[in-house]
Amino acid sequence: MSEGTGIYRTFFEAEGCRSLLKKHLTRGKFEALKEKQISFGGTLDDCIRSGVENIDSLVGLYASDPGAYTTFAGLFDPVIKDYHSVPVSEPIRQPPCDFGNVNELSFKDLDPEGQYIVSTRVRVARCLHGYGFPPTLTRELREEIEKKTCEAFGKLTGALRGTYHSLTNMKELEQKQLMDEHFLFHDHSRFRRSVGGYDDWPIGRGIFYNEDKNFLVWINEGDHLRLISMQKGGDLGAVYKRLVKAVLIMGETLAFARDERLGFLTFCPSNLGTSLRASVHMKIPRVSAQDSFKATCEKLNLQVRGTHGEHTEAQGGVYDISNKRRLGLTEIDAVTEMYYGVKQILQMEKEFSEGHSVIQDNKTQNTFSGRSNIEDTVTRRSKIPDTR
Ligand code: ADP
Ligand code: ARG
């Protein structure tokens, strides 16, 4: 493995590559880390291959196993800080898990009239303690993870009770339907394929869902588990409360991998910490038509994805807007950050649709953090064309 040859050379010389891997993997760091081995058998190559092969990666780095975060901390730490907006001068520190008091949430329905928000989803990732991540998993280990998780499903009762559907036995048509409904994952991300994400597919993979199809668990999609709560409309409080209840129950049976400094350990460093992503699918044709749309979202610590997830396009003006930061804040803070950010985007969309003229007011506050998150001038054009 030499930075002077083959794909590494192409990567180091690639122009236009904007991934965090490219930004933080210097040639010197590569040389210093390339021979190190981790207890699960992972290597630097396992961690960086996705970003090296896919130069359009955003992050470009995956952990081969939990040990990668310490053995290759010299590379992971700067990427983690960069992604989760931890200042370079501050240490990475995940506070203890805190879902807040779910019986006293102050979230109101974000869109009670159902005009803008199609659906709301909150998910967390969990990996089982003592196992590696996709590059170091075998067929047997994936099956073991699946088996342990299925045993824990037995503890879910009432509205959370459901059935596990293994992908091994699932017809293609059923898979397609579940994917079209945004319930099921797929096996066509070249980013994950590069690092063994689909080895032995579909063995050890599957989806659990309850009768109402508003609580789901993915097994071995990338992280060992994804626990997901979702429903139509904008009632974030109901979605979050259901998720928290289910996560706590699953955690009574399963030992989740957690690190004091990094929080819940995940395959991708973008999910460390809380591993929580709270998203809405929302129709925002006017705000999204602004040149400043992505920058506005960044300032609100929001991430923009397409209708079918990451690396997809928005269809029919429907965007996936979620909290970007998952590390360095608690679970309740992450979801609250998303709530106020989405509220603000919605407010802007409403103002545009009411034909407000150019507004030079710029000190829009993120009411949750108290920081002035949009400090640039948001120039709102009058009579934005209706693109719906
Ligand atoms: P994650 O990393 O949270 O699992 P992805 O971007 O991979 O998210 O998307 C997974 C699936 O979840 C996709 O089908 C996506 O369309 C769907 N999804 C995400 N947010 C929502 C939402 N608010 N409503 C409905 N589906 C959603
Ligand atoms: N590896 C991909 C990239 O760098 C995804 C990064 C973050 N997303 C994720 N689902 N882990 O673009």
Image (cartoon, rainbow, N blue to C red):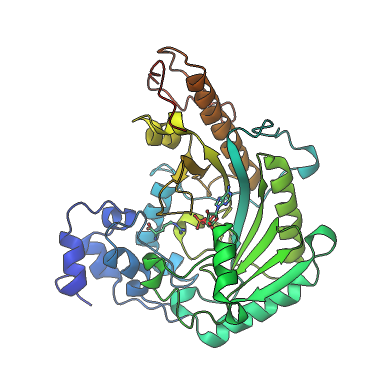
The residue closer to the viewer here, 388 or 253, is 388
On screen, residue 274 above or below 117: below
- Residue 34 locus on image (x, y percent): 28, 73
**Residue at image coords 59%, 68%:** 127
Quadrant assignment, res 370: top right
Q: Quick check: can you spot residue 132?
A: yes
Quadrant assignment, res 311: bottom left
Residue most toward the right?
A: 158
Q: Quick check: can you spot residue 224?
A: no
Q: Is residue 128 left or right of residue 158?
A: left
The residue closer to the viewer here, 188 or 139, is 188
Q: Is residue 48 left or right of residue 165?
A: left
On screen, residue 119 above or below 10: above
Quarter of the image where the N terminus is located: bottom left
- Residue 209 locus on image (x, y percent): 70, 65
Total count of labels = 0
Residue most toward the bottom?
A: 140
Q: Is residue 212 left or right of residue 320?
A: right
On screen, residue 373 above or below 26: above
**Residue at image coords 42%, 34%:** 288
The residue closer to the viewer here, 122 or 290, is 290
**Residue at image coords 59%, 53%:** 274
- Residue 343 locus on image (x, y percent): 58, 30
- Residue 111 locus on image (x, y percent): 65, 32
Quarter for ligand 1?
A: bottom right
Quadrant assignment, res 164: bottom right
**Residue at image coords 80%, 65%:** 161
The residue closer to the viewer here, 326 or 302, is 302
